[in-house]
Amino acid sequence: MLAFYENRKNDFSVRDCRVIPKRLNCSAHLHYHIELVFMLEGTTPAFADTEQCLIEAGDAFIAFPNQIHRYESAAPERHVLLIINPNLMPDLVSIFTNAVPRKNVIKGIANDPEIIHLYEMLISEVADERYAKTMQQGYLLALFSRLLSKIELTETSSSESHSLKSVISYCMQNYQNELSLSILERELHISKYYISHLFSDKLLIGFNEYINSLRISYACHYLRHSSRPVTEIASLVGFNTARTFNRAFVKQTGTTPSEYRRAAKTIKEEKT
């Protein structure tokens, strides 16, 4: 199953289709974020890695970070789609990065009054912007703690999918350091030629392009949520020079780091 690696730019996003139904349909992809679907009306076939499942009304579907997934909806449904950076929940990151669900569908959980309440609070407006992020993290922790209590987790077998996850996991944990196919071969005991094959065949992206994409994703977070100088951020996310960072950033986002920061600041000010 071919899959695209998505470089998600936002830490948290919601698509609520309760009013106007939409199809839940997309090709195979993976990303560092958690993807969560609450199905309210309708039925959608879904795939997680190589396993097929059916999301029915009242169910939830969850894809863990770097788990290849796709949907094949035939008609519009009423659903809620959340995509969340696991770093927003530091207490749970190790769970999301070291295991996968034995079953990605949680039956009937979308009808749970506690789940509904936590979701409504999560997306509700916060009167005092100073506490918005803290409240968001609190409701995310509560929501996913409830969900995880309903999920049986398992270690991934030593298959091609597991090798890919091991490589991606290592890259995410070491993106600030020097990374190359030779380094991964030495550290993970996986042939560098096989690693190269995994990226080109499964993710349709070259290894170096993936590393740049990963580093730029973290850089975007720092640009939005910190006042660190651009040169410091470049070094922090693993680029040797500011010039290399700028070139990679423009290629990934179509704008310079400084322009990205100004645009993010303008959007934030307009919301206040």
Image (tube, helix red, strand yellow):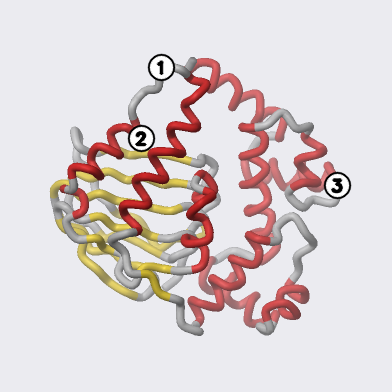
Q: Nearer the viewer, residue 70 or 11?
A: 11
Density class for disc 2 (Cα within 10 Å; few <14, some 14-19, many ≥20) is: some
Q: Name the amino acid, label 1.
A: Ala
Can you tell which quarter of the image residue 210 is in?
bottom right
Q: Name the amino acid, label 3.
A: Thr
- Circle 3 SS class: loop
Judge from the rendering whether residue 192 lies leftward or rightward of residue 243; answer left or right: left
- Whole-percent x and y of residue 71? 30, 59
CA–CA distance in space, label 2 to label 3: 39 Å
- For label 2, the residue is 122
- Whole-percent x and y of residue 263? 60, 25
Height in image: 200 above or below 220?
below
Residue occupying image coordinates x 74% and y 55%: 176
- Whole-percent x and y of residue 44? 21, 58
Tag shown at residue 241:
3
> Which is more foreground, mark 3 or mark 1?
1
- For label 1, the residue is 127
